[in-house]
Amino acid sequence: MKLITLIENELGSNPNLTCEFGFSIFIEDEDTNLIFDTGQSGIFVENIKKLGIDTKKIDKLIISHNHFDHGGGVKNYINFFGNNFSIYLNKKFFYKRYGFSKEYSRILGANFSEDFLKKKDVKINFITDHIHNISKNITIFTNFKNITNFENPNSTYFKKVENNFIFDDMSDELVLGLNTSKGYIILCGCSHFGIVNIVENIKLLTGKKIIGIIGGLHLSKASDERVKRVINYLKNENINYLALSHCTGEKTIEILKREGFTIISNHTGNILEL
């Protein structure tokens, strides 16, 4: 299995590519090629071209959650490469998302609608169950249950349900489980639901030992206590393959390094061989 980070906050080893705040990763495996998340603005399509990825072989787009920095490239992808794929979304994906606080009020959701996808004749697969196999080695997990008592979603997140704004518990989040030669690794867009919650849910659903995490842990603004508890959990679980990026937070990554973890580079253009 090969993973290529198509776009992320920082550039990796290829200076010819473009980066932005957001996340997108390409997966090539024996029976499927897919893209997980699409970045913020759609410029990841230029990186796809420069990397020489054959989009005709890509049969799936999976969007981890309805935030602009993960689903913002869907329109551009369709406009450049067509609709020869199925898109996978949680059934709650299309609720409109917002951020409300004393300092700001803003739209957080992606820039495409269900009607747009239908007009473009894109096949939509709404994931309704906790565990959904999409290929020999790749599984989608969602509808997580809250197990921990220290990983509450951001209190400024809201979604509009009918005409009401309600707290967004990020229950639309999708995570991938990857059965690799190194062991079972999970791929997260942002881990809004809490990485410990996510790991514990997947363990309960599969009985598998999880050895690694790829993607964002959403700890850039987390309290010191929460970061400490997450790191202690990773130690206790012996989760030592960490290709972290996007919203994990530089401070968290530095603490992980001091605690003896090896952090694998996971920035724009970097390749992971699993």
Image (cartoon, rainbow, N blue to C red):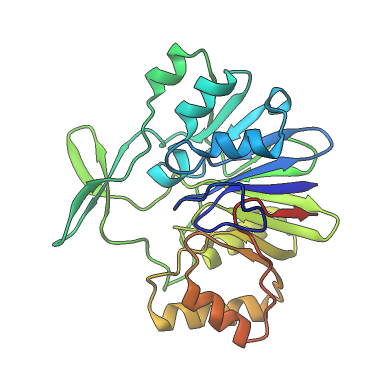
Q: Is residue 75 above or below residue 265?
A: above
Q: Residue at x 84, y 37 (%)?
A: 30
Report whether 68 appears left or right of 214.
left
Nearer-the-camera pick, 4 or 241: 4
Q: Residue at x 60, y 87 (%)?
A: 258
Q: Is residue 270 above or below residue 24?
A: below
Percent of width and height locating residue 103 = 15, 61
Nearer-the-camera pick, 116 or 171: 116
Q: Is residue 134 visible?
A: no
Q: Is residue 142 visible?
A: yes
Residue placed farthest to the left in the image?
102
- Residue 62 position by quadrant: top right
Q: Residue at x 55, y 75 (%)?
A: 253
Q: Is residue 248 above or below residue 272?
A: below
Percent of width and height locating residue 128 = 52, 35
Q: Is residue 13 above or below residue 126?
A: below
Residue placed farthest to the front in the image?
16
Report whether 80 appears left or right of 75.
right
Q: Residue at x 57, y 57 (%)?
A: 11
How many numbered marks appear?
A: 0
**Quadrant of the rendering where the C terminus is positioned:** bottom right
Percent of width and height locating residue 192 = 44, 58
Nearer-the-camera pick, 18 or 116: 18
Percent of width and height locating residue 113 = 37, 26
Report whether 50 appears left or right of 83.
right
